[in-house]
Amino acid sequence: MQLQMPENKTIMNRDIVVVGQQPWDTEIGSNCKNIALEFSKQNRVLYVNSTLDRVTLIKHKADPKVQRRLAVIDGKQDGLVVIKENLWNLYPDCLTESINWIKNRTIFDILNKKNNKKFAKSILKAINQLGFKDIILFNDNDMFRSYYLKELLQPSVSIYYSRDYMLAVDYWKFHGADLEPALIAKSDLCVANSPYLSNYCKKYNPQSYYVGQGCDLEMFRNLKDDSIPTDIANIQNPIIGYVGALQSIRLDIKLLAFIAKERPQWSIVLVGPEDEAFKASELHNISNIYFLGGKDPSVLPAYINAFDVCLNPQIINQVTIGNYPRKIDEYLAMGKPTVATATEAMSIFEAHTYLAKRNEDFVSMIDTALKEDTTELQNKRRAFASTHTWENNILEIYKAINISSNM
C-alpha cells in the first residue's frame, strides 16, 4: 500500500513504528525521541527500544535498566508502556546475541537474521496488541538489528533516517560497509539531517531527501538571567568561546593553539569536558586559553551570552564532515557571531556564519566578526535559528514521504 497525498499535506491518523539505536530511557538527547514525540501529535506511534544483547547482560547485569529488560523477557513486567497520548514505548521481550565480533559474513548474516526475527516477533506482538495497521516504519540508523524489518514487518512505507555517518565509527565499519548501503537501497525512501548525508544516501537510493534538523532552542532564545557566571566574569574581553564536549576526533587542537598564539589579546574560553588528548595537549600551557570544564546544560546559555564570538573549530574527517552541528543553532539563537570550519553540513548556515577553510581564515574572520556585529545581524541570526524546529523537521519528513509515494 502506498500513501497517496499531495506533497505538502500533513500525514495524520497513521500508525508509525520507530526503531533505532537509542532506547527511550537513554539519558542523552535523541533526535529520534524528538521526532517520535512530534509524530505522535497527529499519529499513533510505537517507539521500540533496542534489544538487550547477551554481552550487555553479562557485563551490566546489575544495572537497573538491564534488570528492567530482564523482567520483561521473563514475563514479570509488561514491556508495553504508555508515554503519553498516542505514544507507546516497547521493551522487547527477547534477548539477542552479540555478533558484531564475527568477521565471517555468512555466519554473521545467519545470526543477524535470527536476531532480526526475534526483534520483529516482539514488535509484531505489540503492533497486534495496539491494533496498528498499514504501519510506517521509521528506522533511525539501526543497520544491523533492523536490517530485515522491512521484510518481516511488511510496512506500507519504510524510511531510513541518516543523522550521522556511522561507518566512520569502528563498531559499524566492518559489516556496515555492506549492510547500510543495502538497507538504504531497499528502503522506500531515506531522509537525512544534513546535505552531506542525503547525498550519501542518494548514491544508493534516488528517493533520498534532506529534511533539516529540529532543535530545542527555548532556553537559548529566552535567557531569563543575564548574569555572567563567576568563573568567566573576570576573564578579559574579547572572549572567543566554544561550548560542548572537547573531543579530539571532532575538534582541531592545533587550530585552537594557532588562534590563541596569533591573537594573545583574545581570551579563548572552552566550556565542556575534555577527552584524554585535550587534557594532554599544549593548550593548557597557553596563557590566554581557559578551560572551564563541563557544565549543567541549564547554564550553557549564560556562558554563550558572555562570548563575543562563538567557535566551532572542527577537524575535517568522516565523523564531522556530514554531522549536523546543533551547537550552531544554539549560538545563533542567542544572536552570536559564529566562526566555524567550512564543511558540507555547514553550508546551510553560510548566510549567517563565517565559514573558514584555513587557520588564517579563522583569525581574520574572528577579527571581522568582532568589528561588524550589529543588532540587525543578531536579529537575523535569531530568526534563522528559530526556523529549525522539530515541527518544521517533521513537515519536511512528511513532504519526503508524500513526494516518494507519488512517484
Image: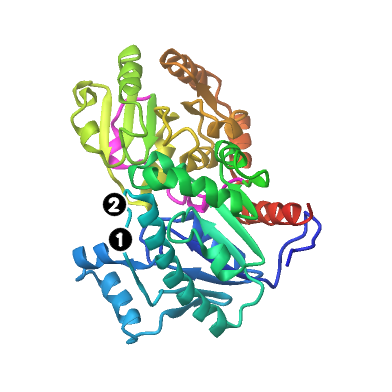
Which residue occupies 23% across, 32% down? 277
Relative side of 250 to 380, left or right: left
Q: Position of residue 148 (x, y in %)?
A: 51, 62
Residue under numbered circle 2: 101
Relative side of 94 to 32, left or right: left
* Chief SS of the magenta region: loop
**Residue 214 visible in the picture:** no
Q: Write the start and end of the magenta stretch as one range.
A: 212-237
Residue under numbered circle 1: 98
Q: Which quarter shows the N terminus?
A: bottom right
Identify the element where label 2 is drawn: loop
- Identified by mark 2, the residue type is Trp
Mark 1 touches mark 2? (CB < 8 Å): yes
Which residue occupies 32% across, 75% down? 69
Relative side of 79 to 335, left or right: left
- Identified by mark 1, the residue type is Ser
